[in-house]
Image (cartoon, rainbow, N blue to C red):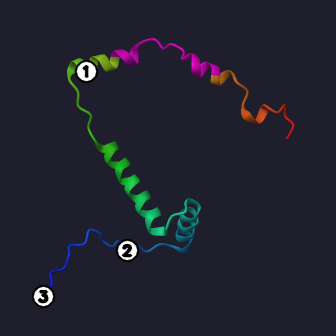
Amino acid sequence: MAATANRKDHPLSMRLPDADLAIIDRAAQLRGRSRTDFVREAAVRAAEDALMEAGLIRMSQEGFAAFMAVLSAPVAPVAAMVDVLRRPPPWDRDGGQG
């Protein structure tokens, strides 16, 4: 008798309202993805976010003191950001001629 290979894929079944399914299908189509790929990617991303939010950040007392010193230091403008913020927005660049 032939041994069966261990599958790496596990089915996941969900019941969704028609409206939810329609919006998922529309978004998946816009991304050029299958419904399965789109939902899998979104679920994995949400799971990673939840795990990152729940994780602890550990550091030494010296590291924490250095971190707090950086946060407490006076701010200095970043020249490149100041330049970008002084530019007119793209929708105003044509002189309002739409």
Write down the residue under mark 1. 63
- The amino acid type of the residue labelled 3 equals Met
**Residue placed most toward the observer, 98 or 62:** 98
Of tags 1 and 3, which is closer to the observer?
Answer: 3
Question: Does residue 66 appear left or right of residue 83 in this picture?
Answer: left
Say which label, 1 or 3, has the lower sequence index. Answer: 3
Q: Secondary structure at mark 2?
A: loop
Q: Secondary structure at mark 3?
A: loop
Say which label, 3 or 2, has the lower sequence index. Answer: 3
Q: Which residues are magenta?
A: 69-83
Q: CA distance from mark 3 to mark 2?
A: 31 Å
Write down the residue under mark 3. 1
Q: CA distance from mark 1 to mark 3?
A: 61 Å
Q: Residue at x 76, y 36 (%)?
A: 91
Question: Does residue 93 appear left or right of residue 40 in this picture?
Answer: right
Of tags 3 and 2, which is closer to the observer?
Answer: 3
Q: Secondary structure at mark 1?
A: helix
Q: Quadrant of residue 79?
A: top right
Q: Position of residue 10 (x, y in %)?
A: 30, 71
Q: Position of residue 33 (x, y in %)?
A: 51, 64
| Residue projecting furthest to the right | 97
| Residue projecting furthest to the left | 1
- The amino acid type of the residue labelled 1 equals Gly
**Dot 1 crowding, Cα within 10 Å, few <14, some 14–19, many 20+:** few
Say which label, 1 or 2, has the lower sequence index. Answer: 2
Judge whether residue 80 is colored magenta: yes
Q: Is residue 21 above or below residue 58?
A: below
**Residue placed most toward the observer, 25 or 73:** 25
Write down the residue under mark 2. 13
Question: What is the magenta segment's predominant secondary structure?
Answer: helix
Q: Quadrant of residue 44?
A: bottom left
Q: Residue at x 25, y 21 (%)?
A: 63
